[in-house]
Amino acid sequence: MVHTVRIGTRASKLARLQTQMVVDKIASAFPQERIEVVLVTTGGDKTLDKPIAEIGTRGVFVKELEEALLRSEVDLVVHSLKDMPTDVPRGLCLAAVLEREDPRDVLVCRSAAVQAASGTALDALPAGAAIATSSRRRAAQLSSKRGDLRFIDIRGNIDTRLKKLDDGYSDAIILAAAGLKRLGLEKRISQYFSAEELTPAAGQGTLAVECRSSDERALEILKSIDDPSARAESECERAFLSKLGGGCSVPIGALARLEGDRLALSGCVASLDGSRVLRMSLSGSADDPMKLGENLAVALLGCGAQPIVEQLRLSLPSEISPP
């Protein structure tokens, strides 16, 4: 018997490309399945005139996809894991995590002269340069390195952001390396940031597939494409974020790397203005990635992150809950 697997995704070029990666993996493992891609418009796609942190909805690029899943309009939905809140709605589960792409953040400069300058591209930017980013995490961490820079909001898909940059909207933009690489735009990258310079968002570079927890067929399909290494890293990072009470629009970063049977986790908590940036690392057994993430969060809270997190909770009530 031929089944039809309906996969929900956002309509952007990158989202459709990433969904095709999932389609290809499922088709390879289950060639008898008929696969249909269903485009879903999310709140983050519809509201482009406000910064993400001001939209004030749960998972601005996730909510409508999950609702379509709960209404059984689709069988699976594909997310960029960094967009997913850590609390998955009842009745749904994160059933597959795909092999991770480069998790780093990158700088893309408008001026070729800056790109070719000696030293780093960030150092070569003139005083008062405008950096476009929709991420408070990125702005806060880089503010601590270059307090003279101006950070301005930017929305839209990657192609839209690059066009705005080229048209003079800003001197540079910060993006995720993964998206640029998947779109074949790696040549636009002026500088890669290490996790010590700019700790990425939890789950950055990772694709996640969500389904209904009662859908045995979907669970069977997704189990076959789940990557154990990427899952261990993502569970560790998301446990860290959850313990701190952070959402998608707060200056909290986490990067876990699997090294044999050990996980190494780097975490960062920053004040919104970048005046305080706390970083800490911890390693532990890969057998319990969530425990490692929670332990690092507790350690950071005990070393000065608690008042920063409390202030963030007051300034962004829709995005943060108490740890």
Image (cartoon, rainbow, N blue to C red):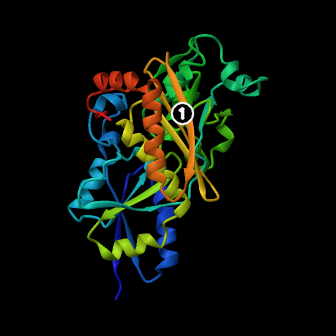
Quadrant of the snapshot with the N terminus: bottom left
Q: Is residue 126 left or right of residue 272?
A: right
How many marks on residues? Answer: 1
What residue appears at the point 56 percent right and 41 percent down from the top-left corner? 282
Estimate the x, y position of residue 157 in percent, counting from the top left: 46, 40
Estimate the x, y position of residue 110 in percent, counting from the top left: 63, 26
Q: Quadrant of residue 52?
A: top left
Q: Which residue lies furthest to the right in this view?
A: 118
Estimate the x, y position of residue 91 in percent, counting from the top left: 24, 61
Q: In this view, does 216 lie to the left or right of 181?
A: left
Identify residue type, mark 1.
Answer: Lys
Q: Quadrant of residue 142?
A: top right
Q: Nearer the viewer, residue 195 or 288?
A: 288
Q: Residues within 10 Å of mark 1 (few under 14, many from 20)?
A: few
Q: In this view, does 220 lie to the left or right of 73?
A: right
Quadrant of the snapshot with the C terminus: top left
Viewer can see residue 154:
no
Q: Which of 52 and 58 is in front in this view?
A: 58
Q: What element carries label 1?
A: helix
- For residue 314, above or below residue 240: above
* Location of mark 1 (residue): 163
